[in-house]
Image (tube, grey):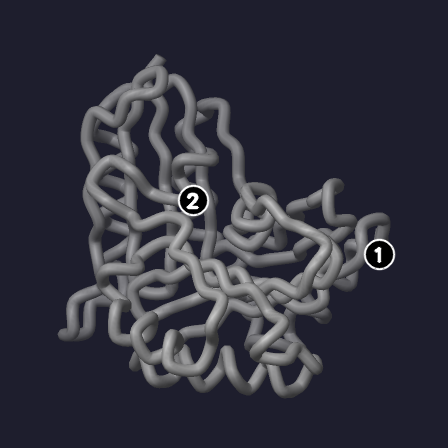
Amino acid sequence: MEKLKLLFTKDGLHYQLCKNKSVLEESTFFIPEEPHPSFISEKLEELLNSKKYQHISIISAVNHFTIMPDGFSEHQLGYDLIAFNAPVDKEKEELMLSVNKKFGVQFYYTFPKDYYEKIKATKLPTHFNFSGEGFLNQLITKNQKEIHINLYHQQCEFFALDEKKVVLYNNLDVNSEVDFLYFIMFTLSKIGFGIEETQFFVYGETTENETFISELKKFVKNLRIVFDNVPKKHFLLNGG
């Protein structure tokens, strides 16, 4: 069975074509510097029309989201809750929900309606998920203070956990690795996680963001790179 896996970030689209557990092909498209607002939409359409798939798996790391306790059921408030974190255009964004029973949280997030309609028009079995839920679902945690960081191209998401409970999640668009470091350290100071007692775990585009990691090592003593994206192996898509 050939399966198409798609990962949408703030400025790109990564895809894998898989058969059983083997990755047959993959590539990443980033929005070019010159204005081209429909670039990702066009690449998505090309992918959807290029082959016949049996299943499509979609992960959105676009940072229009909010996190709520599992069981929150006032779904009609989803757009309004997300609007506290990011501007929302109901005409252009589809409201989605991802639930993580293991940690007792759920994510409301929006997905570009243009992409959503193109994917649904294939009439194939599809599975949508938010990157935060996919990331959280793959974590192995202990009864300690932990920061888990998933790195992308000019973007990162991270969880703060204390004794296997989610304290905080954020998904950031940043223009430099220094910004990554600033946000992570600022978060520590706000939630009362001490440098000495906190364990740091890093995943994703670690090679691309090696400056961030080398700078982080200057401040923290307990840091481990858990997963480095390499060709045909991608942290989030591996679990999708």
From the viewer's perspective, is residue 169 above or below residue 3?
Answer: below
In-front residue for pair 56/27: 27
Q: Residue furthest top?
A: 1
In-front residue for pair 24/55: 24
Residue 45 image offset from top left, x and y in percent: 27, 41
Q: Quadrant of the N terminus?
A: top left
Residue 10 image offset from top left, x and y in percent: 37, 64
Residue 216 image offset from top left, x and y in percent: 39, 77
Instruction: Residue at 44% x, 82% y: name it.
Output: 219
The reply, left or right, for residue 179 in relation to residue 102 is left
The residue where tag 2 is placed is: 236
- Visible residue check, residue 192: yes
- Visible residue check, residue 65: no
How far apart are the alpha carbons under marks 1 and 2?
Answer: 29 Å
The quadrant holding residue 191 is bottom right
In-front residue for pair 31/17: 17
Which is nearer the N-term, disc 1 or disc 2?
1
Mark 1 falls on what kind of element?
Answer: loop
Disc 1 marks a residue whose amino acid type is: Glu
Front: mark 1 or 2: 2
Instruction: Residue at 50% x, 78% y: name it.
Output: 184
The reply, left or right, for residue 120 in relation to residue 168 is left
The numbered disc on residue 74 is 1
Instruction: Residue at 38% x, 68% y: name it.
Output: 155
